[in-house]
Image (spheres, rainbow, N blue to C red):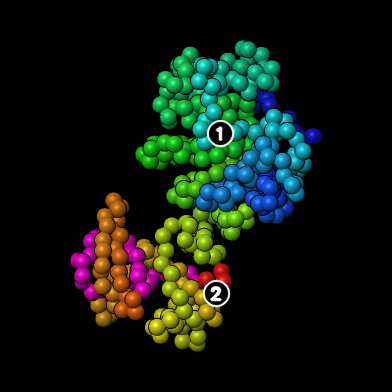
Amino acid sequence: MVENFSSKAPVNGCEVVIDAVSKTFGNHAVLKDISLTIKPGEFFTLLGPSGCGKTTLLRAIAGFHPIDGGRILFNGHNVTSLAAWDRNIGFVFQNYALWPNQTVFDNVAYGLKLRKVPKGEAAERVRAALEQVELHGVEKRFPAEMSGGMQQRIALARALVINPPLLLMDEPMSNLDARLRVALRRELRNLQKRLGLTAIYVTHDQEEALEMSDRIAVMQNGIVQQLADPETIYSRPANRFVAEFVGSANFLEGEFDETGFRMADGSRLLGAARGHSGKGTLVVRPEQVMISQSGSALFDARVEDRRFMGKAWTQSLRLENGAALSVETRHALDLGSRVGVNFETVTFLPAGA
């Protein structure tokens, strides 16, 4: 039996254990023997492209999708066979799932009504939940009268009003404009930490994941490709898929020998990522490329294109061996000019990674 988390008092976060979970739709395996543990009070993100299995895993945790193999545990209790309404989780849907013919109050109070919470207590808890998401005096309004950002807050208040130890969110900001997303994700992160609950967040937006998460599970084809903190995911990707999906990257193919890394055309990067051997790929992030005077660097390159991206200029360079290189700099480089290229740091991926 699952612990009762439905009291008025704030609760601590819930540990979630995913133990060898598999799920198949027809002949298609959507989740393939996934095992991971989400810590109490952690902001944990499932990140990946459409069809990778992240939403299916989230809905399996919620109890919306029965699984074909494995177990799901909340604080050590097996909830695999429990219905969604018995798991006492808060869930924020991508489209918010607000009832248009009901007031904000009735939308937020829905979970309390199902739990037969007395009206006086329910009114107080609805007010408190709306205050948590910084909405005041909107109880009598209808969702259609509210902006997209306010609707998102209403959906969040509805999830929080039952004081769940676990909050699940399925791309809740995908329908908002970029400026509002940036503001709300900071507020959501702060709120989650203040309440101390565990949050599992699904997104395909790598910038969103990097900013908000304590840890990230990058998924592809129903498999967790890498599970780590945001800095590790970005700076030390486990394989080429992670390196390509999370941020921009340059890839240089070649082989290590006793003198360093030898590229396919014979060019050498002496001392680059020493300690490795064999064929593989060097991953270099655009901001890790250093520009110097031509002739005084590892490579010479020609500036082919440049684009101003707000926080930096993105320059497209062409190395002498024909390889393309993307670079981020604070200032624009002259089109057609020759520059020297050095690398601040690199990551080595062995062949096949």
Residue 332 at what x, y percent from top left? 23, 61
Q: Quadrant of residue 117?
A: top right
Q: Secondary structure at mark 1?
A: strand
Image point (38%, 72%), residue name: 343
Residue 344 falls within the magenta-colored stretch: yes
Residue 179 at what x, y percent from top left? 36, 39
Which residue is the site of mark 2? 351
* Quadrant of the drawing holding the N terminus: top right
In the image, taking residue 97 as reference, residue 116 lies left or right, namely right
**Disc 2 + disc 1, Cβ < 8 Å:** no
Q: Secondary structure at mark 2?
A: loop
Residue 135 falls within the magenta-colored stretch: no
Q: Is residue 168 above or below residue 21?
A: above
Query: Who is closer to the viewer here, 75 or 101?
Result: 101
Label 1: how many Cα within 10 Å (few below 14, some 14–19, many 20+):
many
Q: Earlier in the sequence, mark 2 or mark 1?
A: 1
Residue at the top extreme of this rendering: 120
* Quadrant of the drawing holding the C terminus: bottom right
Q: Amino acid at mark 2?
A: Ala
Image point (55%, 74%), residue name: 351
Label 2: how many Cα within 10 Å (few below 14, some 14–19, many 20+):
some
Residue 68 at what x, y percent from top left? 74, 47
Q: Is residue 227 visible?
A: no
Residue at the front extreme of this rendering: 27
Query: Who is closer to the viewer here, 168 or 4?
Result: 168
Residue 206 at what x, y percent from top left? 47, 51
* Magenta region, residue range: 323-348
Residue 92 disc label: 1
Q: Quadrant of residue 248?
A: bottom left
Image point (48%, 69%), residue name: 347
